[in-house]
Image (cartoon, rainbow, N blue to C red):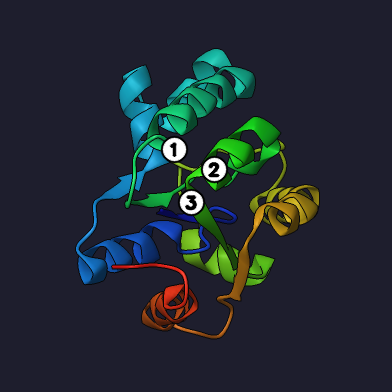
Amino acid sequence: MNIVLIGMRGAGKTTVGKMLASHLKKDFIEMDDLVAKKAGMKIAQIVKKHGWEYFRDLETQITQEVSQKDNVIIATGGGVVLRSENVQVLKKHGKLFWLSVGVNSLLKRIGNDANRPSLTGKSPKEDMEETQIQRQKLYEQAADVVIDTEKITAKEVMEEIITNLEDTYVY
């Protein structure tokens, strides 16, 4: 069974995923990195050159590939939930943990990172608010477990995931 981390960009998926992988001695997969590698360019460049639909197509291909692995930690891209086929295939071999966090915290965490292109073409705050509203229900529907990361550290998030897995996961 895979441990799959979903949530908005800046929610801590990569940070927590690396910590989990190290702690549990499992391989870590960062899906956005695989998409960028497959395209031969950074995500911002992919979007600028080919658009979001092309990026989502690549993301779906990568999702299909990584979901076939077993016993790994997967940090998804924030928009992986936009396509139901991605969620279905990730759930088939994994448990999905939604790292939930508010917009203000997300903005503090990612700032004006040029590698995180606007999803709406609006200001960072408007972009984040609109995206959060759009994806909220999708994260809720996809998640097996919701972890509010607003007031806890990455280590505490990791510990909460491990505690949740103790009944169902052999590691």
- Circles 1 and 2: CB distance less than 8 Å? yes
Tell which tag, 1 or 2, sits nearer the viewer. Answer: 2
Q: Residue at x 54, y 53 (%)?
A: 9
x and y, in percent, of residue 82 in the image: 69, 37
- Circles 3 and 1: CB distance less than 8 Å? yes
Secondary-structure class at tag 1: loop
Q: Amino acid at mark 3?
A: Gly
Q: Earlier in the sequence, mark 1 or mark 2?
A: 1
Determine whether 10 is above or below 164 in the image: above
- Give the distance between the C-alpha atoms of the residues marked 2 and 3, in whole angstroms: 6 Å
Callout count = 3
Secondary-structure class at tag 2: helix
x and y, in percent, of residue 89 in the image: 55, 36
Q: Is residue 103 left or right of residue 33?
A: right
Determine whether 150 is above or below 9 in the image: below
Q: Which mark is residue 94?
A: 3
Q: Which residue is mark 2?
A: 92
Please state which of residues 138 and 45 is positioned toward the viewer in this rendering.
138
Q: Which residue is mark 1?
A: 67
x and y, in percent, of residue 158 in the image: 39, 75
Determine whether 58 is above or below 34 in the image: above
Quarter-wise, where is residue 50 in the image? top right
- Give the distance between the C-alpha atoms of the residues marked 1 and 2, in whole angstroms: 8 Å
The answer to whether residue 6 is visible is: yes
Q: Amino acid at mark 2?
A: Lys
Secondary-structure class at tag 3: strand
Q: Residue at x 39, y 35 (%)?
A: 66
